[in-house]
Amino acid sequence: MNYPCEIIKDLMPMYIDDLCSEQSKAAVSQHIENCDDCRQYYNSMTAEGNYTVTNCENNEAFAQSLKKVKKQIRAKHIFGIVATATILLTFAVLSAVAAIGLQHIEYPILYENNITIDTRIPDGWEEWIADGNKYYVHCKGRRIEGVLCKEIKMENGEKYLFFQLTTNKWYDLITGKNHTSHQSFTNIEYYDRVYYYPGYIMEDLAAIADGEMEHIYNVSTLIADNTGKEK
């Protein structure tokens, strides 16, 4: 810590007589090495005949000087502690605000052969299977924020399910590539086909007429095909 020259000069008599603490001695020594003015002051005090403890004419003034130095050092230490605590608290608050903000930036997860649906119950999920669903969707390398589904009934009577997984910016920052997240899923055997759709599913699929379904198929991935199976 860099102390002002005034404090160092106040400490100088105690430093010369080896009366100050190790911390104060270290502070004075470091300061003298880097400050020409204080080094000259020290040399002038230690010159032969210039300074002795017995030559202090006013012991009361010397005692007051010691008190002043202690107060100045204590005040500087307290200021340093308060400043450090303030910086850390500010950083923590800003980090929390940023995390909350990033959680609201939600977007679809792209399909990269990392999404599967099966009846495998994830570890630790045994107590959550009472909802009647026996299928689960698994996503490797991403953390699932939500699941969006849209059922479309075709003219031939077949029912197709389009679904999508979403995540958010915060999850992407904290999730490792080896992490696998899980979500309970609807019973897919009720549908003739199940597709994963990477677009904005609710807005896009709700507005598409039957004649425009080819575009949806081109950008979707077929996950399950139950065509012809008994439902």
Image (tube, helix red, strand yellow):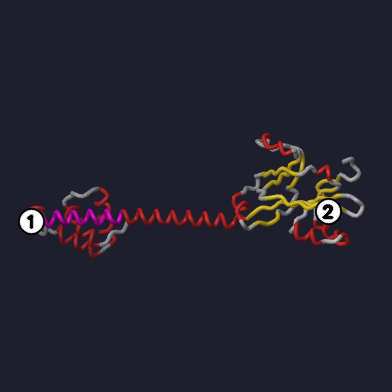
Kind of element beneath mark 2:
strand
Kind of element beneath mark 1:
helix
Rendered location of residue 50, percent (x, y): 11, 59
Q: Mark 1 points at which residue?
A: 55
| Residue at figure coordinates x 78%, y 53% from the top left | 150
The quarter of the picture where residue 121 lies is: top right
Q: Which residue lies furthest to the top in this view?
A: 126
Rendered location of residue 18, percent (x, y): 18, 49
Whether the residues at callouts 2 and 1 have beta carbons within 8 Å, the answer is: no
Magenta stretch, main secondary structure class: helix
Mark 2 surroundings within 10 Å by alpha-carbon count, few (fewer than 14), some (14 through 19), many (20 or more): some
Q: Mark 2 points at which residue?
A: 152
Where are the magenta residues, as a range?
Answer: 60-77
Q: Quadrant of the N terminus?
A: bottom left
Is 66 within the magenta? yes
Rendered location of residue 197, percent (x, y): 77, 54
| Residue at figure coordinates x 47%, y 56% from the top left | 91
| Residue at figure coordinates x 18%, y 49% from the top left | 19
